[in-house]
Amino acid sequence: MKKVRVKGLNNDKRQSTSTTSNLKVISFYAALLVVVTALLGLYIAWVELVSPGNSAEIIL
């Protein structure tokens, strides 16, 4: 009977390292987008708060 070769998940070190590196890059860009959108939201809120012509009162 012929032996069946089974390829494990971590046999190829280059592929594993490449996948990990790609995930790190993707997670970095995702975190950067979250920070940019948070800053944009804060800027829009600040502009709306400071802009003249709003007759709404802010109660703290």
Image: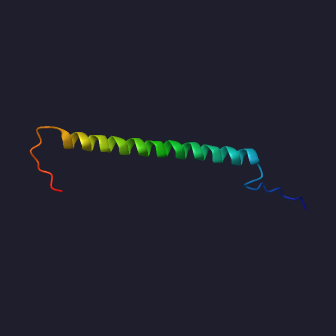
**Residue drawn 42% across the image and 46% down it:** 34
* Percent of width and height locating residue 46: 25, 42
Residue found 48% across the figure and 46% down from its top: 31
Give the mark count. Answer: 0
As drawn, which residue projects farthest toward the top? 52
Q: Residue at x 64, y 48 (%)?
A: 20
Report the side of 51 relative to 18 (left or right): left
Point out the residue furthest to the bottom here: 1
Direction right: furthest residue: 1
Nearest to the observer: residue 1 or residue 9? 9
Name the residue furthest left. 55
Percent coordinates x, y for residue 30 in the rendering:
48, 45
32 to the left or right of 57 = right
Residue 1: x and y, percent? 90, 62
Quarter holding residue 45 = top left
Q: Residue at x 27, y 41 (%)?
A: 44
